[in-house]
Image: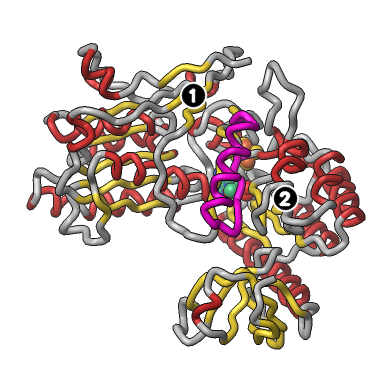
Amino acid sequence: MKKERTVSNHSADLKSGKDYSKYFIPPDLKEAKKRGKEEIQVVQFGDIEGELKTLGKGKTFLMRTYGCQANEHDSETIAGLLGSMGFTPTEEEREADVILFNTCAIREGAEDKVFGEIGRLKHLKKEKPELVLGVCGCMSQEEAVVNRILKSYPHVDLIFGTHNIHRLPVLMRDAFFNKEMVVEVWSKEGDVVENMPKVRQNGLRAWVNIMYGCDKFCTYCIVPYTRGKERSRRPEDVTAEVRDLARQGYKEIFLLGQNVNAYGKDFTDLEYGFGDLMDELRKIDVPRIRFTTSHPRDFDDHLIEVLAKKGNLVEHIHLPVQSGSTEVLKKMARKYTRERYLELVRKIKEAIPDVVLTTDIIVGFPGETEEQFQDTLSLVEEVGFDSAYTFIYSPRHGTPAADMEDNVSEQEKKDRLQRLMEVVNRLGREKNEALRDQVVEVLVEGESKNNPDVLSGRTRTNKLVNFRAPKDCIGKLIHVKINEPLTWTLNGEVVEKVEV
Ligand code: 5AD
Ligand code: SF4
């Protein structure tokens, strides 16, 4: 059994006179690449006490979040920590005492956006020098990014990494009182920190981390460097959190991990995998449980067997393929072939005939030939994805693919993306068309973004449905008949107002 201890809590830091953040700790790519053998410790977050508890009294914070659900959920934790310090949220830039950017490093475009925003705030910082401007998330884990901020964006006050979130109270204090930029980015992953406060942004759907980090090291991907090694939360901690959320009335639990199928592989005292966890969670009284994101390599038969039991385990699997060419998959170090992926899909469909499969695809990987791209198109057709996130390959500094020779022109890459999207959209339309006149279960989320007279919600397969219904349906599960399927959404009418 793991040793339990309490995270060196912030008031203890103060009492002992220890002040880690006096040290300037920038990220270190070499360190981030390492995968140590040390056992992961579960650490309990201690209460925020003393001066830190009131530091934010009368002050406001604004947070901008970029990237994936893991980041969105980290922002909920950051909001929880700031809330525990007395800060209140605001959406008004000019009012905010703290502005934080929780950033994404997955592609260059995501990074450019953040640099643009930080640059734009230079004026505000000049007008209001007491404003604390902070950068966290995946970009802060990159050496090149931190160097660029130090050199060209000196108006930033605070940079902290993805492994330093629990240190925010102390770091925020230092950012308020220090003249120098406070930088604390641990490159070696920390422990699994439990019980941090959270302010969830959605009252119906709750994100729950089941594991952190990734050890797959796909050659194009920066995530294993920015999020550290795979660390699973203990099953009892995950189930306790899900049970608690169910009691609070959440209708949908969204399990998160960079590679959920590797869940439990890091346990040294326990033979327990993702299939076992799902089998346990399906017994909890909550209408829907979904997860993201899966790696095909670790997707085992036991998991398929458990998912086929359905109940609250929804029939939607996001299964990133990245490419349909075995040669490209090899260069990406995905550790499966086209044939193995298709075999996995066959097994899943056999066990769960109404499963909806979605995917991620990268086009224009270094050296990708037209023929290899055609393999991707044919795989997409063969699987029949309901939708796909499609990307042009973006070189990430420090990853192996960034040093591979690339003879595919930008224009060609754009052209391939366009052709891929046409196929993906056509398939999506066809899949949705098959739902015409079908009755689907919808979890009603609220008013539609475009029309307040219309409500919208999601099916078990995560498709967006718009329909007219009384507002008291919000938060409920209802039955909707689809009468107008579109490419990305479905329009329908309520056939039953009763909760299912
Ligand atoms: N360039 C383009 N797309 C990428 N992804 C990850 N790294 C890169 C990159 N360097 C995509 C993958 C992954 C999704 C989250 O982002 O498709 O599944
Ligand atoms: Fe990146 Fe591959 Fe890990 Fe996914 S599995 S986070 S693509 S390295």
Residue most toward the right? 350
Local packing at callout 2 (Cα closer than 10 Å; few below 14, some 14-19, many 20+) is: many
**Residue 395 coordinates in the image, percent (x, y):** 53, 42
Does residue 309 sit above or below 443 in this rendering? Answer: above
Q: Identify the amino acid type marked 1.
A: Glu
**SS label for mark 2:** loop
Q: Quadrant of residue 151?
A: top left
Please state which of residues 168 and 371 is positioned toward the viewer in this rendering: 168
In magenta stretch: residue 244:
yes
* Residue of label 1: 189
Q: Residue at x 77, y 42 (%)?
A: 279
User: What span is in magenta?
Assistant: 232-258
Please provide percent x and percent y for residue 103.
40, 45
Secondary-structure class at tag 1: loop
At 23% from the left edge and 39% from the top edge, which residue is drawn?
152
Label 2, on which residue? 319
Which quadrant holds residue 392?
bottom right
